Amino acid sequence: MEKDSHARDICLLCGEKLPGKALLEFEGMPASAQNIPAAKDLEGERGIPLRLYQCACCGLVQFDCQPVDYYRDVIRAGGYSTTMAELRRRQYRHLIETYHLEGKKILEAGCGQGEFLAVLKEFPVKAVGVEHKKGLVEAAAAKGLEVSQGFAETADTLLGGKGPYDAFLSFNFLEHQPRPGVMLECIRNNLAEGGVGLITVPSLEYIVEHGSYYEFLRDHIAYYRFETLRKLAELHGFAVLEEELVNRDTCAVILRKVEKGREESIKKAWIRDGEIRKEDFSALAASQVQIGKEMEKLACSLKEKGETLALWGASHQGFTLAATTCLGEAAEYMIDSAPFKQGRFAPASHLPIVPPDYFHQHPVEQIVIVAPGYTKEIAGIIRSRFGERVRILAMRSDHLEEVR
C-alpha cells in the first residue's frame, strides 16, 4: 500500500516516532462514518486504504491518517437507543453516589445535541454541556439543556464558562482526537481540585478477542486498551480509580485529578519496565478472511432460494462490512432509526439508508443486524413490526448467527 504524503508518523499518545511497518492494512474502507453521502455525492465517493500501527514506546494502536474534518463534533446516533440510555443511568448513579456528587456541577465535554445530558438531568446535579458544532448546540438548547459552544482546543481553553466543575463526562470522543493529551489537559484545568471524571472509549480488547475487524474505522484514529488509556491519563494529571468493560465492547474508566509534574519519569518507566504489550493481529487478519467467506456463503444461499436481504444498522460496523464484503452487493438496502441518516447512502458501498417502515413497501426475507451493541433491541423491533416470517441474522464476533 502506497504511503500517503499527508500521513502522520508521530504517536498520538507519547509523541514518539511510529514504526516503519504497519500491523494491518485495509483496502476499500469507508472514508467517514458521519459524512454520509447524499445521491449527489456518489459519483466521486469511494473507499480508502487505512494503515494501523502500534507505538513501540507506549503501546498505543493507531491509524497514521489525519482525523476526519468533524472530529471536534459529537454526532451520536446511539442517543436514539433505550439500551444506551439505561447504561448511562447506571453509570451516572454509580458516579454520583460513589463520589458524593449530589448538588455538584458536572460537565459533559462533547455532548452532541444533549442525548446523554438529558438523562443526567434526572439526577440531583447541575448538568452542563459543551459542544463544538453550532447546530447541535442549538438543538440541545431547544430541549431546555444548558449547553454552550466550545471545544478543548488548547490546554487553557475555558469550557462552558461555568467552571470549575466537580466532575466531567466524555463518551466515545477521545478516540477521535489527534491531540488527546491536550483535550485531557484542558478538561483537567477546568476541574476543581480532586475533581473526578468518567471516560469511555471503544475497547481494543474486544476487537482483538472477537476478531471484529469491522470495528476499525477512519473516524477512530486511536484504539485503546485499559493500559494505554491509563498511560494517557497519568501523563496528563489524572489517576485511574476504576476500570470497567461495559456493553461488551467499551472501556470505561473513572479518573481523579491529581498533582502534575511526573510526566517524563512516567514515560521513562514505560520503556524501562518493558510494559508494552506487543499486539499480534494475525488472528484478526484471518477473521477478516473468514467473515468474507461467510458473507459469500450467505449471498449464494440467497441466490439459490430467490430471497432478498436487508441490513439493519447504518453504523460504522455496518458501513465497513458492506464496503469490504459482498454484503454491499447482496443487500437491497440498509435500515436505520436515526432520521439524519435516512435518505442517504452507506459510504463506499452506496447502499441506500432507509427508515424501518420502508420494509412494508419493500419487504425482504432476511435481515442481518450489523450494529452489535444493539442486537437484542433491534431484533425485538423486527419481530414486533415485521412479524415472525423474517429470518434475522446478527454479527457475533467473527461469524453470523441466527436470532430466534
Image (cartoon, rainbow, N blue to C red):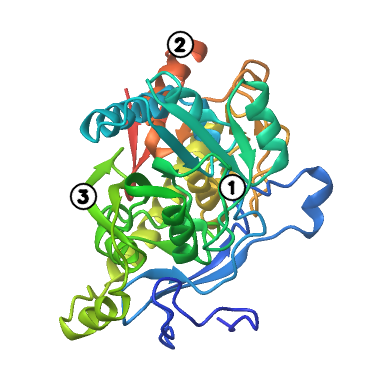
Does 296 appear above or below 102? below
Cα–Cα gap, marks 1 and 2: 26 Å
* Quadrant of the rendering where the N terminus is positioned: bottom right
Q: Of the two numbered discs 3 and 2 on the same chain, state the one appearing first in sequence.
A: 3
Residue 374 horizontal/vertical position (percent): 40, 31
Which amino acid type is marked by label 2?
Ser
What mark, if any, has residue 375 been given in the picture?
none
For this rendering, which residue is in front, 162 or 314? 162
Does 252 appear above or below 228? above
Mark 1 is surrounded, within 10 Å at the Cα level, by few (under 14), some (14 to 19) or many (20 or more) other residues, namely many
Cα–Cα gap, marks 3 and 1: 43 Å
* Quadrant of the rendering where the C terminus is positioned: top left
Q: Nearer the viewer's eye, disc 3 or disc 2?
A: 3
Q: Which residue does the numbered mark 3 point to in the structure image?
A: 241
Can I make out residue 164 in this image?
A: yes
Q: Which residue does the numbered mark 2 point to in the structure image?
A: 384
Which amino acid type is marked by label 1?
Gly
Which amino acid type is marked by label 3?
Leu
Q: Are marks 3 and 1 in contact (CB under 8 Å)?
A: no
Q: Are marks 3 and 2 in contact (CB under 8 Å)?
A: no
Write the residue at 29% across / 30% down. Answer: 96
Q: Of the two numbered discs 1 and 2 on the same chain, state the one appearing first in sequence.
A: 1
For this rendering, which residue is in front, 144 or 135? 144
For this rendering, which residue is in front, 362 or 352? 352
Q: Which residue does the numbered mark 1 point to in the structure image?
A: 328
SS assignment at label 2: helix
SS assignment at label 3: strand
